[in-house]
Image: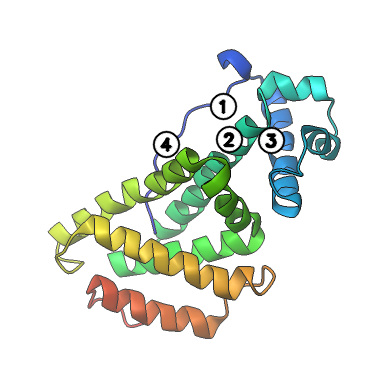
């Protein structure tokens, strides 16, 4: 899992540019929303509860978001950008495609261990905001497909359909993370599980340049 696509600078309601202080307040609201949606669920996580947790007034909330669904959608995209950034920064340290894959997966698992809300919120998006759920996965795969296509052209990865491979690898990572991180209450990925996953991934991409 690698390759980050660049996002846009956050703004307030109506496209209002945000100052440094405004960006900090927006971040506080997103962090409070992350906790509220994860712990209470979308329907019980009211704007009042979000603003109380963030330590700001309700009026302030509406300077940044025009309603609960808007902050939910923005939170999904925020988590998306952060997990992609973590994976891209980690994978860039690898010298081969196989190394980059394993570093990217490792970063994904570390991020989800620190932010188990990622799973809970994405699953809520299926019902609350299916269009944002689709955008979440499309953003995850966009650069990933391009990277795999390039690796195939350079002979680092077995020839095949890079889009199918990207979605398949993402599915593996998401379910393995759910089993050994989310269901184990946000614990770190066990080393034995990651080592076995590494062997599966190297075989899946047809790499011969790394012995996990």
Residue at the spot 46% in from the left edge and 56% down from the top edge: 87
Q: Nearer the viewer, residue 146 or 182?
A: 182
Residue 27: numbered disc = 3
Which mark's residue is nearer the viewer, 1 or 2? 2
Distance between mark 2 and mark 4 Cα atoms = 15 Å
**Residue 76: % across, % down:** 56, 43
Q: Are marks 1 and 2 in contact (CB under 8 Å)?
A: yes
| Label 4 Cα crowd, 10 Å radius (few <14 / some 14-19 / many 20+) | few
Residue 45 versus residue 89 in the image, above or below: above
**Residue 24: % across, % down:** 71, 31
Looking at the rendered structure, the secondary structure element under dot 3 is helix
Q: Are marks 4 and 3 in contact (CB under 8 Å)?
A: no
The residue wearing badge 2 is: 74
Can residue 127 be seen here? The reply is: yes
In the rendered structure, which disc, 1 or 2, sits on the residue that comes first in sequence? Answer: 1
In the rendered structure, which disc, 4 or 3, sits on the residue that comes first in sequence? Answer: 4
**Residue 196: % across, % down:** 43, 84
Residue 10: numbered disc = 1
| Label 1 Cα crowd, 10 Å radius (few <14 / some 14-19 / many 20+) | some
- Using residue 76 as the reference point, say whether residue 40 is left or right of it: right
The residue wearing badge 4 is: 6
């Amino acid at each position: 899992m690698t390759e980050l696509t660049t996002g846009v600078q956050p703004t307030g309601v109506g496209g209002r540019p945000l100052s440094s202080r405004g960006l900090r307040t927006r971040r506080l609201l997103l962090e409070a929303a992350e906790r509220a949606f994860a712990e209470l669920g979308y329907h019980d996580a009211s704007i009042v509860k979000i603003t109380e947790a963030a330590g700001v007034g309700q009026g302030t909330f509406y300077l940044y978001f025009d309603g609960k669904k808007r902050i939910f959608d923005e939170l999904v995209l925020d988590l998306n950008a952060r997990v992609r950034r973590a994976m891209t920064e980690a994978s860039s340290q690898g010298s081969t495609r196989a190394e980059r894959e394993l570093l990217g997966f490792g970063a994904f698992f570390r991020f989800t261990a620190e932010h188990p809300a990622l799973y809970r919120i994405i699953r809520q998006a299926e019902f609350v905001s299916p269009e944002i759920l689709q955008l979440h996965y499309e953003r995850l795969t966009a650069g990933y497909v391009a990277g795999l296509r390039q690796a195939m052209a350079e002979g680092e990865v077995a020839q095949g359909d890079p889009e199918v491979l990207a979605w398949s690898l993402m599915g593996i990572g998401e379910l393995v993370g759910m089993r050994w991180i989310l269901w184990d209450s946000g614990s770190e990925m066990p080393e034995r599980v990651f080592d076995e996953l590494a062997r599966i991934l190297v075989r899946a991409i047809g790499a011969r340049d790394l012995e996990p």
